[in-house]
Image (cartoon, rainbow, N blue to C red):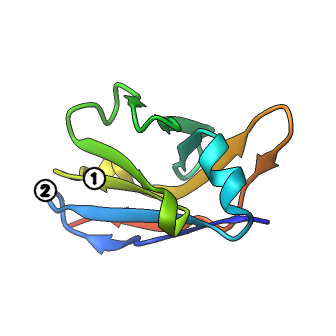
Amino acid sequence: VQLQASGGGLVQPGSSLRLACKLSGSANIFARNHVQWYRQAPGKQRELLATIRTSGSTTYAKSIEGRATGSRDAGEKTVYLQMNNLKPEDTGVYYCNIFSLDYDIWGPGTLVTVSS
């Protein structure tokens, strides 16, 4: 069981990207758990960016608040993170995670590089 992130790439400052993260496991796991997005920038600790709850409500880190929108699709077992007005400091590997009493699920991240 893992969470596969995708949608990264090399973009210019001011661009937008839509990142996706798909769970390979049971739909029940997805439906019953919140999903977090993290970013690990080069040489820095992993940073919690967003929480997308089972209800669909979201919380964002100050570093992306106002520029990001999270959503989830239960039928696709996928969460999304729409990132707008990207900045060079948004560069990093983006991961998602399910963490609960029963699970601690990660997977391969997706690299976002913001550079002119």
**Badge 1 density bin: few <14, some 14–19, many ≥20, Cα 10 Å:** many
**Is 74 situated above or below 41?**
below
Q: At 34% from the left edge and 25% from the top edge, which residue is drawn?
A: 62
Q: Position of residue 102 (x, y in %)?
A: 86, 39
Q: At 13% from the left edge and 56% from the top edge, which residue is drawn?
A: 14
Tell me which numbered mark, 2 or 1, is placed earlier along the sequence: 2
Q: Determine if residue 80 is in view.
A: yes
Q: At 50% from the left edge and 35% from the top edge, which residue is drawn?
A: 53
Name the residue beneath numbered marker 2.
Answer: 14
Q: Position of residue 50 (x, y in %)?
A: 45, 37
Badge 1 amino acid: Met
Q: Position of residue 108 (x, y in %)?
A: 66, 68
**Is 74 situated above or below 60?**
below
Q: Quadrant of the N terminus?
A: bottom right
Name the residue beneath numbered marker 1.
Answer: 83
Q: In this view, does 70 lie to the left or right of 39?
A: left
**Is 86 situated above or below 19?**
above
Badge 2 amino acid: Gly
Q: Residue 5 got which mark?
A: none
Question: SS class of the residue under badge 1?
Answer: strand
Between 12 and 61, the residue placed more toward the observer is: 61
